[in-house]
Image (spheres, rainbow, N blue to C red):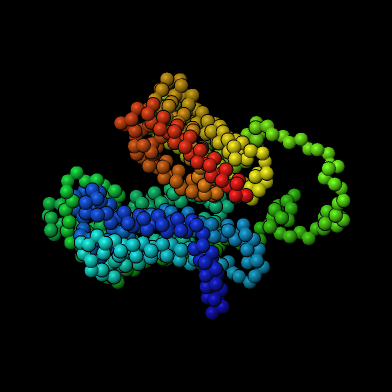
Amino acid sequence: MRAISMIYYIARADLLERTRHFSFLVTLGLAMMAAYFCVPPADAGYVTVHLGGVYRGEYNSAWIGASVAISSLLFLSLFGFYLVKNSIQRDKRTRVGEIIASAPVKKLYYLTGKAISNFAVLSLIAAAVMGVAAAMQWNRGEVRRIEVWELVSPFLFMVLPVLAVVAVLALLFETRKMLRGGLGNVVYFALFILYAAMIDSLPFGISVYTSDMMRELHEVAPAFSDSYGIGILFPHAPIQRFEYQGVEWTGGLILQHLIPLAAAAVLLLLAALLFRGFKEPVRSGSTGEASGEITGVDSAVTRSEPSTIRAAKLTPVPAAGGFWPLLAGELRLLRKGASMGWFIVTFLLSLLCLFLPAEVSRTWMIWPFVWIWPLTLWSGMGNRDTRYRTEFLALSSPRFATRQLLAIWLAGILATLFAGGGMLIRLLLERDTAQLIYAVSAVLLIPSLGLVCGVLTRTHRVFEVLYLLIWYLGPFNKTPILDFLGGGVSDWRAEQAGGLYFLLSLGMVGAAYAVRSWQVKQR
């Protein structure tokens, strides 16, 4: 009984803390907005879940519940992880972990409470999406009679079990130092892509609904080709509707979709085995404050009497206002964020881009990999002072909003040139002007995006998630406009695309400057 009470209070305290954060409200709003667009009006000209490109279900509870649940499953599986992946780190940062370390709290109890809190946060968002789905069914007016079971059952048996795995995975990643930062975000994004590719073939995936939809459509339209799509589609032919009755959930089917709960329990036990707690060993040469421990050393400053020296008698200290030392300092900070292994891989990628023909590098996906490798360097731009609590020291420097932002931006550009230098030299040697324009535009565009995301959000995770999506849809899958390497912009000339990216870069830097200037005035 004491264990249950301890887990409950840990989960409750963490849930109350999380729901007060702005990031929770943003994710909640985006999820509800996505649910709204998943149920477009009949004359909207687009569909989100469709069969064969020309069929969709009538807007009854069965169709809306299934279609909104499928879209929410993909949305929350990705963004939900990044929302809840800061629970243990927050306790370390706020030094609550030191209190927990001194209390008789078992690691399994602590992590169970955190996992329940993560799951509760994601479940609250899913519940809000269900409410929006019910409101949209009534608002669209095709079938206003709401059947609660048909609307709720897709979320209960298809969405929530997977969200339990996401909640525990966020904890598991936090227990390993290698997976806490940007590398962990990239690894999870790769796992999400793999999950999205297999989602229709997994025993607990969406096939329970997609196969049932196609089976029911075959009964009224025998000529229907077995195909479906998820995402925004603008059909060329008028959309035809059919009445979808929903899935009949049997005991065996329910057990099949509860497999992720068993997987979440196993992952939670694994996290408890890997978690070392908050009793971090003190590094040699570090102070008690840096290691999170109170040393008890009585310094000479605390023992001395207050000084009676007047400030006017002190020797004037000349202010070093040079810009180049500031830029060199920002470059050193970027360098500290990269290990020796990172530099070795960067050097090898540059050699491959330099000595292989450009077409070979594109075919072997070397170029797209070059533009994702410095992700953790770009994500630290504009938010490093907030993350390490040095913003008040930086604010005291002269012309903080202009000089430091410019130094951060230029340091990011130089780091990008270092990573993509082999590619740029190869394009110069081949005299491929069009691809060179795209590459130079990317050198400006990516650091600008990292800077504005860091200044606006004061965290590195927003840029990492946003840029991973842009990179996956653009350079990796060659989606038009998003492919800043030029592979997907078939209708645009390189000069037009390069000009657009250049203007976007300037606009993002200007937005970062405006926000930083406002922050300085608020201080």
Q: Name the one closer to the observer, 178 or 474.
A: 474
Residue 343 appears in the rendering: no
Q: Residue at x 65, y 44 (%)?
A: 394
Q: Residue at x 82, y 57 (%)?
A: 302
Q: Does residue 493 appear to the left or right of 383 in the view shown?
A: left
Q: Does residue 2 appear to the left or right of 64 in the view shown?
A: right
Q: Does residue 103 appear to the left or right of 423 in the view shown?
A: right
Residue 183 is situated, as x and y percent measured from the top left of the image, at 52, 47
Residue 252 is situated, as x and y percent measured from the top left of the image, at 30, 69
User: Total marks drawn?
Assistant: 0
Q: Residue at x 62, y 49 (%)?
A: 523
Residue 276 is situated, as x and y percent measured from the top left of the image, at 61, 60
Q: Name the one closer to the observer, 63 or 2.
A: 63
Q: Residue at x 51, y 38 (%)?
A: 510
Q: Quadrant of the N terminus?
A: bottom right
Residue 479 appears in the rendering: yes
Q: Does residue 508 appear to the left or right of 302 in the view shown?
A: left
Residue 93 is situated, as x and y percent measured from the top left of the image, at 62, 57
Q: Residue furthest bottom?
A: 1
